[in-house]
Amino acid sequence: GIALSAVSPDIQIRRADASTTDTGQIRALAHTLVEAFYGEHKPQHGPWTWVQREMMETDVTTDLTRRLNYYEEARACSYPHKGAIFVAQDAAGLVHGFVDVGASMFDTVKRSFALPPR
């Protein structure tokens, strides 16, 4: 990936790509996203909350995988809509955050965002 300067010398920012990012790494990004939105899961939240979070993380993992694959294909085929996922992580590989920079289209019928058509 591309190395960029970060706020801390201990954290490196890189562009994730489909060829070098495995499912475990994508799952870590999904966990980071769900935890950022809903907070840390605690035992007192109960088992149903844990199941809901696992389902959300699975959905986010699927979406991030699709996005990574789309962005790689867009770069390789020179599509007009390109994007990237940049990940901030420390030397131990712990994810501190990430950002998805890309063009998504809003489907007014489904009322949701989707990747641009090819």
Image (cartoon, rainbow, N blue to C red):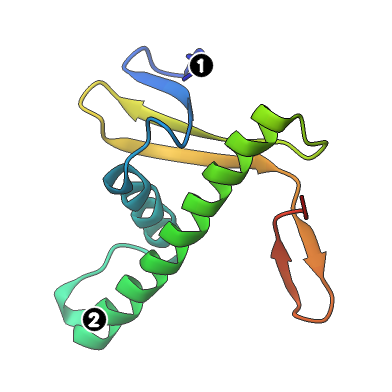
Q: Which of the numbered marks, if any, corresponds to residue 2?
A: 1
Residue 58 spot, x, y in % from top left: 37, 67
Find out whether the residues at labels 2 and 1 contact each other: C-beta distance under 8 Å.
Answer: no
Residue 33 spot, x, y in % from top left: 44, 55
Quadrant of residue 56 within the rendered picture: bottom left
Horizontal side of residue 27 vs 42, given as left or right: right
Give the residue at x 24% y 81%: 45
Residue 19 spot, x, y in % from top left: 42, 32
Task: Tell me which label, 2 or 1, sits earlier in the chain.
Answer: 1
What kind of residue is marked 2? His
Q: Which residue is mark 2?
A: 45
Depth check: give the residue in front, 84 or 48: 84
Decide: is 26 above or below 63: above
Residue 30 spot, x, y in % from top left: 40, 55
Give the residue at x 36% y 63%: 39
Horizontal side of residue 15 vs 35, given as left or right: right
Decide: is 13 above or below 105: above
Give the residue at x 35% y 29%: 89
Query: Circle 1: is it few (<14), some (14-19), or many (20+) Cα within 10 Å?
Result: few
Query: Circle 2: is it few (<14), some (14-19), or many (20+) Cα within 10 Å?
Result: few
Depth check: give the residue in front, 19 or 59: 19
What kind of residue is marked 1? Ile
Horizontal side of residue 42 vs 33, given as left or right: left
Give the residue at x 26% y 87%: 48
Give the distance between the C-alpha atoms of the residues marked 2 and 1, in whole angstroms.
Answer: 39 Å
Horizontal side of residue 103 vs 37, given as left or right: right
Q: Residue furthest front?
A: 77
Decide: is 58 above or below 6: below
Secondary structure under the numbered disc 2 in the rendered image: helix
